[in-house]
Every structure is written in C-alpha cells, then in structure tokens.
Amino acid sequence: MDLTATERVLVHLHAFWNAPEPGRERTQAGIAEGAKILRSHVPRALQALQEEGLVDSQDARLRGHTRKVRVYGLTEAGVRRARQLV
C-alpha cells in the first residue's frame, strides 16, 4: 500500500511522539529526510495535518543550536491516526 505524503509525515512523527527532547527529526528538514519526501512538500503536508488537528508545532531550541526552530509533534488524535497506519 502506498502512503500519501501526509501519511508518511504522520508515520515519521509517530516514532518521536514521546521523545523527551525535540530533535532535528521533528524539524521540516528532518521530516523531509525521514518521510522521504521533498523538502518543499513538507510545509503543505504539515499545514493540512495541523488543520485536521493531528499535528501541532512549537518553537524550541535544539541541543547544540543557539536559535529557536519550529518543531512539530503529534496530538493525541495524530498518535491514534498514525497507529492505524503503522
């Protein structure tokens, strides 16, 4: 079964849904690499998932970086949906 880009993003983020600290995997660049989609497609997929209430975002400092970056994570509904896909 082929997954859509948004489904791949959900499955990718599911692996990090309970991580204690945000990592690069939860940034747009990390999502693009992990979900194997083009970096330019990530914002569109994330926006659709946020509108559905499956993903939320926050600004955080990653270890080793001085600037804050936006990181994404699954909501409870997002975790449930990702588990269905996995």
Image: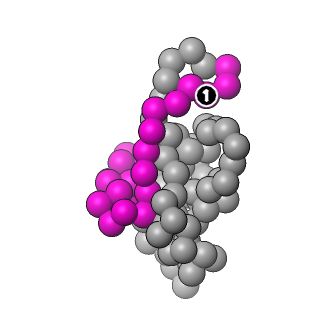
Q: From this view, report whether residue 12 is shown above or below residue 32.
A: below
Q: Horizontally, is 22 left or right of 47 in the view?
A: right
Q: Which residues fall within the magenta stretch?
A: 40-64
Question: Label 1 is placed on what type of residue?
Answer: Leu
Magenta-span inclusion, residue 18: no
- Residue depicted at 51% across the width and 79% down the height: 2
Q: From this view, report whether residue 26 is shown above or below residue 34.
A: above
- Residue depicted at 47% across the width and 69% down the height: 77
Q: Position of residue 34 (x, y in %)?
A: 60, 53
- Residue depicted at 48% across the width and 60% down the height: 75
Q: Position of residue 71 (x, y in %)?
A: 50, 40
Q: Position of residue 28 (x, y in %)?
A: 47, 42
Q: Horizontally, is 52 left or right of 78 in the view?
A: left
From this viewpoint, is residue 49 visible? yes
The residue under label 1 is 62
**What is the secondary structure assignment of the residue under circle 1?**
loop
Name the image quarter holding the C terminus. Answer: bottom right
